Amino acid sequence: MNQTLHPKTAAPAPASAKYYEFKPYNVGRVVVWGGFALVLILAPLIFSGGLAHSMLSQMGIAIVACLSYNILLGQGGMLSFGHSVYTGLGAFVAVHGLNRIAGGMPIPVSLIPLVGGLAGVFFAVLLGFVTTRKSGTTFAMITLGIGELVHSMALMIPEFFGGEAGVSANRVVGQSVMGITFGPQIQVYYLLAIYAFICTAAMYAFTRTPLGRMLNAVRDNAERVEFIGYNTERVRYISFIIAGFFAGIAGGMYALNFEIATAEVVGAGQSGAYLLFTFLGGATFFFGPIIGAILMVVAFVLLSEFTKAWLLYLGLIFTFMVMYAPGGIASLIMMNLRVAKFGKLRLVWTSYLALAGTALIMLIGAAAMIEMVYHLQLATATEPTLKFLGVTLNATSLDSWFGAALVTLVGLGMFEATRRQFARQWGEIQAEIEKEIRRREAL
Amino acid sequence: MTTSRNSYAIELKDLRKSFGKTEIIRGANLAVAPGERVAIIGPNGAGKSTLFNLISGRFGPTSGEILLNGHRIDGKKPFEINRKGLARSFQISNIFGRLSVFENLRCGLLWSLGYRYAFWKFLADLRDANDRAEELMQMIKLESKHDTLAMNLTYAEQRALEIGITIAGGANVVLLDEPTAGMSKSETKRFIDLIRDVTVGKTLLTVEHDMGVVFGLADKIAVLVYGEVIAFDVPEAVRANPRVQEAYLGSVLAEQQAADAAV
């Protein structure tokens, strides 16, 4: 502290001072955050209509939830199977808060997400004390257990959780400020967008603090952290509480948007969704969970409209990503940005087209078969035929099955051939980039 | 210090440690004065690593006392001992693989500068921490690897980073567990110079197998055989000690003297 008052005037600036992260007028940073704000502002104008606004609102909620989950998974290496405990309990407390406002409590409706956040902190302080004692598999098992515990409590204590029906509320209560009642969805959207922006910025800031960095250190090598003065349990515990705070805010946003909380919101299914989509978006980069959150809403709202087999497709995509791109979509983007930085992206884009084309053929064939199986299971008694992409398939005829299988196999063969060629090309490009980096270092 | 009579940096009093029924450390006694450089040698299985693990708090002793600057530290947690001014390195590089070299070093010194668990300050604004990390990076000669992830460093570079993290917090008692293990002859020589530079004025305890390193680096040598310190003296005296010759050094020393004669 002394040094800030009496800077060492004699000490020369270190040679590599240019590496300091802090640049007050960092153009890139302004562009990125300005762009993010602009997208949040313009999105409902471009995608207008009831469904779009509802989906955009849900995306805002999911972004906060997935980012808060990634404080645990990506930044702390804590595989939690019970994150919905904190989003869900936040939602319940927030719904009760709305009802209190209706009963005359003088809190503005716009602060309801913060009520959820405080609930998240409360439960994270309480439950995190137990879970963060351990790391790794033990941590994962304890979070799973606590998740089940809270979910079963939701059905056992109807006074608070409302039993099967849940607890509902009305968000158009209390004083309206400047005509904003939060009745129309668009008003709620902009409130949620403001929360999403501030929470994203705050969680990003967290990654730049001493605690945020020590959390990364604990993830990489918890044992070593003990020998540089830090109590790893304390690092995990405080970070867990911070994650709980943002999870609770997401819960409060949910309560405001849906005006109801049911036992499902604290269920294992919801926890699984956070894990799955945070991973899919990419846990190793800060912005990965944002992509995951958008996909989560698209999958839950749109994909489930298209097909009854949507969970199966989701499972296939997840399996595929874990096998071929364990860093998620964010890491795919970053790898390609690196290639682009060295001016080599034009070498691979034809390969990408070929990969996408062959994958599409394979997917169409496989999807036709999946749809036929579902059709046989669900509707065969009434009608053996179904429409699939404009083609009439007969789920009971050999022709349809043979055709679909043929398309799948042809697609698979072509995809594998393209993939091998691409893998070789990719390897060569990476080797060239490594060489280039070494050449630049030597200069 | 509170007990003026006792001015040792590290003192072990009848230290014992058993794993199950096997006693590994069997009444070790040692007193290292501040600023001394002590090499601990001994045959495989003598308990050298266990001794380090006891002093640094990885394990608690079964009985006996460990004093750091006159204060009891036996049974305390590693981070508590570290905060009292003792740091250690590991035999197998124990670094933060997915963080850059700079971040590794900065993590090593955050606690000592009082930043604790702060999440309301930006790392980028912590001038003292950033300057010190840059300084350390130059000391361990990894300036050119500023942004390289630790897991992508060469073996020798990882060893240097390991030392860097260890000394980052400014501890005045430093324990190095086989710092040159697995290095080539030329790397070892450079590395010893590095260790000597970065530990100036500190109390140093090191476990080492390479006798060249031992006699080049240490003011005093402690010989650990079957969990007991059988000799603790300046190198010449330890060489001449018949008990040490018999227990351990005979063959190793013959080699060493042959090498000396050649030079």
Image (spheres, coloured by chain):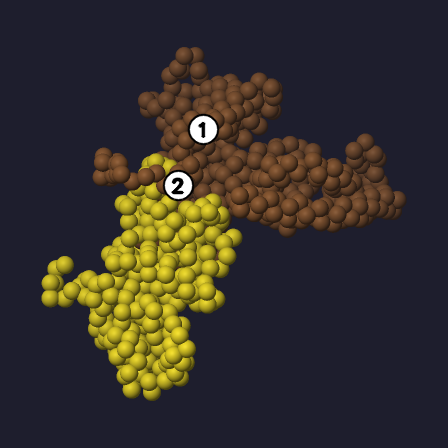
- Of discs 1 and 2, which sits in the foreground? 2
Q: Which chain is yellow?
A: B
| Residue B176 seen in the figure | yes
Provide the chain ID for the residue under circle 2: A
Q: In this image, B246 relative to A387: left or right?
A: left
In terms of depth relative to the viewer, which is nearer, B76 or B70?
Answer: B70
Query: Which chain does the numbered disc 1 sit on?
Result: A
Point out the tag, 1 or 2, that comes first from the N-terminus.
2
Residue A105 in picture, x, y percent from top left: 33, 24
In the rendered structure, the answer to whether residue B50 lies left or right of residue A47 reads left
Residue at the extreme top: A178
Q: Are marks 1 and 2 in contact (CB under 8 Å)?
A: no
**Which residue is at 49% across, 24% downward?**
A34
Residue B131 falls in image quadrant: top left
Mark 1 and mark 2: Cα distance apart in space: 21 Å
Residue linked to disc 2: A15
Q: Residue shown at 46%/47% (left/top)?
A: B144
Q: How many marks?
A: 2
Identify which residue, A214 or B38, lies in the foreground: B38
Residue A428, position as x, y percentages in the image? 68, 48
The residue that label 1 is drawn on is A26
Instruction: Judge whether B5 appears above or below A259 on screen.
Output: below
Q: Residue at x 40, y 23 (%)?
A: A109
Q: Position of residue B99 (x, y in %)?
A: 46, 48
**Regarding mark 2 in the picture, which secondary structure is present there?**
loop
Let me know if marks 1 and 2 both belong to one chain: yes
Colour in which the image shows chain A: brown
Residue A159 marker = none
Residue type beneath disc 1: Asn
Q: Secondary structure at mark 1?
A: loop
Q: Residue at x 77, y 41 (%)?
A: A358
Amino acid at pointer 2: Ala
